[in-house]
Image (cartoon, rainbow, N blue to C red):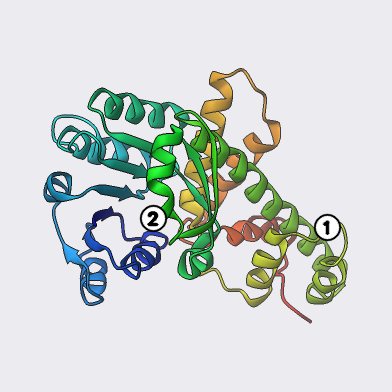
Amino acid sequence: MKIGFVGLGIMGRPMALNLLRSGCELYVNDLNQEAVKALCDKGARAASQAQMAECCEAVFTILPNGSIVHQVLLGENGMLAHMAPGTLAVDMSSITPEEAKACHRFAGERGIHFLDAPVSGGEPKAIDGTLAFMIGGTQEAFEAARPLLEYMGTSLTLVGEGGAGCVTKLANQIIVNLTIAAVSEALVLATKAGADPEKVYQAIRGGLAGSTVLDAKAPMMLARNFQPGGKLSINMKDIKNVLATAHQADVPLPLSAELYEIMTALKNMGCLDNDHSGIVKYYERLAGVEVRPQ
């Protein structure tokens, strides 16, 4: 089976590698030619987006934002305009529900199966193929995509119609990023008050405060390791999308709004290329401490 994959960043590269291991004939595309070469060294083939649209039975995209998704998929030169009826397109980017619905409409008019299928789990789960997929689209498109998605993830949930996957991703990002902010507040308090934040973390992780987010991000904060598994810039974009969608639906989200202001401050601090565990740096600056084991 010929499959196209566009977007070989932090998440896309290991996801594409897992697809390649499935034995498919994989065509890859990215602005970063080093990333393309790395996949080609493993057996993939470099191709333009136009070539993918013409020859592939399924195309996957995971791109930084909605405007890039629009450029790659929609319009006269977009991939969807040149894919054959009955083929499959899956966008795994984190975009707004309205942007996803536009892709669904455009694909549907051309008889192309389309899914909005953003993911959660970060780089570690992208590498080991255990991502969670939140999916919007038809049951028919979902069943067509399932065997391929299973090479990249272990949790595949068809949430609802077109755009529902992106709604779910926004809800996911609220919980993830606000939890990171809460972990940051707690460890900064512990540090400033004289407790060892490493021992505080160990003490609370087995109780009600324990969570996947706590176990993923507290060790990074303590180790001062802010190499991105999920860039703060991408999460800031997602929280902006959260607020835009909420405003459209007249849903007040005061905590998310405050978080966006915190992220704006971190942008001004030059932290956008950090992992989103770097949210702790905002609280550290306020308190005049750094979270480190004693």
Figure label count: 2
Question: What secondary structure is marked by label 1?
Answer: loop
Going by the numbered disc 2, the residue's amino acid type is Leu
Identify the residue position indicated by label 1 in the image. Answer: 209
Going by the numbered disc 1, the residue's amino acid type is Ala
**The N terminus lies in quadrant:** bottom left
Q: Can residue 289 be seen in this view?
A: yes
In this picture, is 292 found above or below 139? below
User: Relative to residue 155, is residue 33 drawn left or right?
Assistant: left
In this picture, is 60 found above or below 247? below
User: Relative to residue 44, is residue 132 drawn left or right?
Assistant: right
Relative image position of residue 220 (x, y in whole percent)? 63, 71
C-alpha separation, residue under disc 1 versus residue under disc 2: 36 Å
> What residue lies at 23% left-to-right and 48% top-to-bottom?
57
The image quarter containing residue 27 is: bottom left
> What residue lies at 67% left-to-right and 45% top-to-bottom?
175
User: Relative to residue 184, is residue 126 drawn left or right?
Assistant: left
Callout 1 crowding tier (Cα within 10 Å): few <14, some 14–19, many ≥20: few
Identify the residue position indicated by label 2 in the image. Answer: 148
In the rendered structure, which disc, 1 or 2, sits on the residue that comes first in sequence?
Answer: 2
Relative image position of residue 188 (x, y in whole percent)? 76, 62
Relative image position of residue 93 (x, y in whole percent)? 41, 45
**Which mark is nearer the camera, 1 or 2?**
2
Relative image position of residue 283 (x, y in whole percent)? 69, 56
**The C terminus lies in quadrant:** bottom right
